[in-house]
Amino acid sequence: MSLLQKALENNEFAVTAELAPPKGIDFSHALQCAELFGERVHGINVTDFQSAILRATSLAMCKALIDMGLEPVFQITGRDRNRLAIQGEMLSAGFFGVENLLALTGDHPTVGDNPDAKPVYDLDSVGILQAATLLSQGVDMGGNKLETYPSFFLGASVTPEYDPIELQLIKMQKKIQAGAKFFQTQAIYSIETMKKFKELTKPFNTKILAGIIPLKSAGMAKYMNKNIPGINVPDELIERMKKSSEPAKEGIKIAGELIYELRDKNLCDGVHIMAIGAEENVPLILDEARL
């Protein structure tokens, strides 16, 4: 059983942090950041060509983390692989000792840095979860028996600010039926959002990690509000960032305060920190959150 699964099943406040593989073959900086996280996180979520941008693979970084004695969360999307390749990646992950898997459908290639790439989408996030569940039962999607097989603690994503929220709740139910045991949310910046979302998801009996993206500037907050569906940075936080002489530090403080309040009010089962290019700040955020 993975550290993340143990923490969530024991009702501990779980912490995961996101880490992107490099655009190249030098893993040193990413691994240095992972070392900084150390025992302060229950899992390091390795992105899979996030935003459809070419990087080294999630599986390669997961293996490097395992070699360091750290626990990865293996992200896999349906954008780039058919069901054969997805199942093969999962079997390889099982061989390497990966225990956590996060299933995503994936952004379309047109938003990334290789826009002429052909999308696959043979499986969406629900299909990936179904495939992982079948593999853990010793059979592949073609009905063929496996001699040996992996076992994963399965997760998926959800957007609490989605409108209409009913569609997200329906998708959550489908993902739970397919095997998801925990969810990472899109970035949230409002305690009220998580209060409402907790009430709405009470019947689901699942674990939810609130997504935390530290703000770097007021401009970043405005950009996300305008361009990223499901993110809503309140005006008061934007004003606070504007007035700060050190906005990056203020963003770290805001993130820490939000995590502390979420934990204090028992509004989620943990947090997933997405520092996006500033992963070295994760320990500072945890300091602010008193974790």
Image: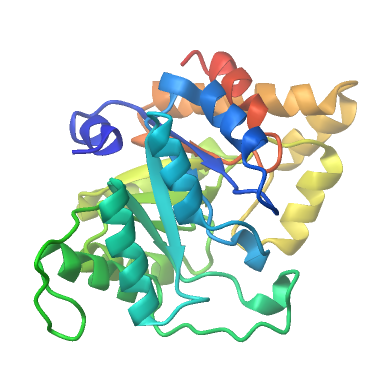
Percent coordinates x, y for residue 141 in the rendering: 21, 81
- In this figure, what is the number of numbered marks? 0
Quarter location, residue 130: bottom left
259 or 43: nearer the viewer: 43
28 or 132: nearer the viewer: 28
- Name the residue rendered at 41%, 85% in the picture: 122
Rendered position, 282 above or below 209: above
Quarter location, residue 10: top left
Q: Is residue 43 visible?
A: no
Image quadrant where one finds the N terminus: top left
Q: Is residue 260 left or right of residue 29?
A: left
Quarter location, residue 86: bottom left
Percent coordinates x, y for residue 238 in the rendering: 79, 38
Percent coordinates x, y for residue 31 in the rendering: 57, 33
Q: Is residue 217 left or right of residue 189?
A: right
Rendered position, 189 above or below 124: above
Rendered position, 77 above or below 208: below
- Name the residue rendered at 33%, 47% in the picture: 199
Q: Is residue 258 visible?
A: yes
